[in-house]
Amino acid sequence: MLKTTKLILSIMLFTILSAAVCHGQAVFIARKALGAVQHLTSSVTSSGSGAAQQQEVGSVLLEANANKVYATALRIVQENQKFKIVSRDDGNKKFDFTDGKREAAIRVSQLQDNIAQILVSSVTTSGKTENPGFIVNGILRVCKEMNIQCSPASN
């Protein structure tokens, strides 16, 4: 009986400790991802017209409240006279805007109580590639305005 009790206690202790270690590793990985701006660019040439179209996507995890992140991104775009907001959905924390040459969409999501994600996508409409750092620079501007340390991820 004593041997069985020790075995059960050992198994329970092992289970609790391994769960704590796994959670700790997940938190460590998430912490390393905070502030790392992920970025992807793709250029496509239309076979019919030969016009180039550039698509760009960027994302970052921030230790912040999504409502504050969304309000900051929206304010930055509204204050820039080059941009015009095309559509806006405050309830879902997303908006679309354009500068006449490209269209972009921003979505801010609350992943956990204090972790927000910014997801930005853009596509050129002018037929030629534009500033390829547009998305990363925009995300870095939001980070700077919120006093959050961000940098482009090393791929």
Image: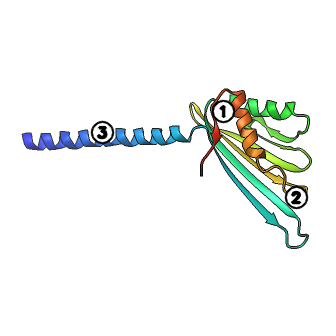
Residue type at the position of mark 2: Lys
Q: CA distance from mark 3 to mark 1?
A: 33 Å
Could you tell me the amino acid type at mark 3? Leu
- Dot 2 or dot 3, earlier in sequence: 3
- Give 96 or 31, whichever is nearer the viewer: 31
Which type of secondary structure does the marked residue at label 2 adopt? loop
Extreme residue in the front direction? 154
In the shown orientation, is residue 151 left or right of residue 131?
left
Question: Of helix, strand and loop, which one carries label 1?
Answer: helix
Q: Is residue 5 above or below residue 50?
A: above
The residue under the point 78% across, 45% down is: 134
Amino acid at the residue labelled 1? Ala
Find disc 3 in the rendering and name its residue.
17
Give how far across and how far down residue 51 sits, in percent.
89, 65
Total marks in image: 3
Residue 152: quarter of image: top right
Q: Residues within 10 Å of mark 1 (few under 14, many from 20)?
A: many
The residue located at (79%, 64%) in the rendering is 44
Question: In the image, is 121 to the left or to the right of 48?
Answer: left
Q: Spot the residue most to the bottom.
A: 48
Mark 2 to mark 3 CA distance (whole Å):
56 Å
Please state the horizontal and vertical placement of residue 102, each as a whole percent of the image: 86, 50
Q: Position of residue 23 (x, y in %)?
A: 41, 40
- Residue 72 visible: yes
